[in-house]
Image (cartoon, rainbow, N blue to C red):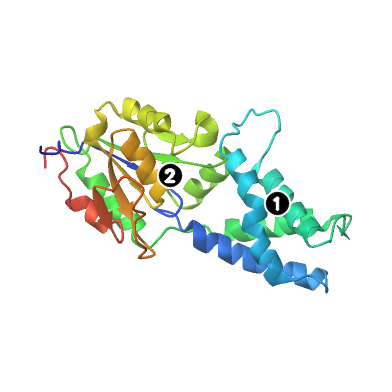
Amino acid sequence: MSRPALRAIIFDLDGTLYDERGGMQRALDTTLGEASRRLPEFDPERARALYPEVGREIWERANLLGPANPQGATTEDLRRQVWRGVLGALGHDGIRYDGGSLADHLAGTYTAARRAGHRLFEDSAPALARLEQWARPGGLERIAMITNGPSDLQREKLSACGLEGRFDPLIISAEAGRAKPDPGIFLDAVSACGFDPAEVLYVGDNPALDIGGAKSAGLAAAWVRRLGEAFPGDLPAPDYTIEDLHPLAELDWGGR
């Protein structure tokens, strides 16, 4: 059975268009260096290992906290929580710095480093521009995005990287109230695009959240394998496996 021509493309942001891993590592290096200067007994390598462990539950919860959530959790609030947890796990609870807490200072250091280091992968801007050239009635009619994360952070990344206003619809999990891999968030985007799921291609780097979620909702899926890893055998296979975004312009877009 032949696959229908594609009419819309939906992008993931982090790890697909935006270099989330690189931005996090650069900011973490800067912040660990600052912590070591302010606290001689600080163990930066143990803190590096603790950082994702402490932050995982906090950030996963934040994916579903909308802008009006009762906890009032901004990205800065969440980073303070993470650094309090890291320092607490290292036995440095309640350390003060410059009239405030060291955790708050480190969260501010991390935030400044992240904002200074927002960047796309080298292939992202030219590949997106080429797809935008194909956008026309009867062909590639929609370029959209679904991204997990807090609203303020994801919108900050889009603005800093020149992507603001380039996706319709733009669905951010914290604003939608559900997150990938929930099939519902994919179907919300498909409905807004106005096509059948099989006419829509989702592009992402995470096998479970992006590819598994998209396939469970009936979309076609392209897996961006930037790290050269093998795709997990227990998940639905992607329709396309690509090393970067350039091949997307060569797919069978309707009306070409």
From the image, tell me which residue sits under label 2. Answer: 209
Residue at position x 52%, y 44% from top?
154
Q: Is residue 7 left or right of residue 244?
A: left
Please state, as top left, top right, bottom left or bottom right, where the N terminus lies in the image.
top left
Residue placed most toward the observer, 253 or 134: 253
User: Where residue 98 sits: x, y (%)?
Assistant: 87, 59
Q: Nearer the viewer, mark 2 or mark 1?
A: 2
Residue at position x 59%, y 31% from top?
66
Looking at the image, tell me whether mark 2 or mark 1 is earlier in sequence order: 1
Mark 2, residues whose alpha carbon is within 10 Å: few (<14), some, or many (≥20)? some
From the image, tell me which residue sits under label 1. Answer: 82
Q: Is residue 238 above or below residue 215?
A: below
Instruction: Tell me which amino acid carries mark 2.
Output: Leu
Q: Is residue 240 above or below residue 40?
A: above
Residue placed most toward the observer, 220 or 76: 220
Please state, as top left, top right, bottom left or bottom right, where the C terminus lies in the image.
top left
User: Where residue 195 sits: x, y (%)?
Assistant: 25, 28
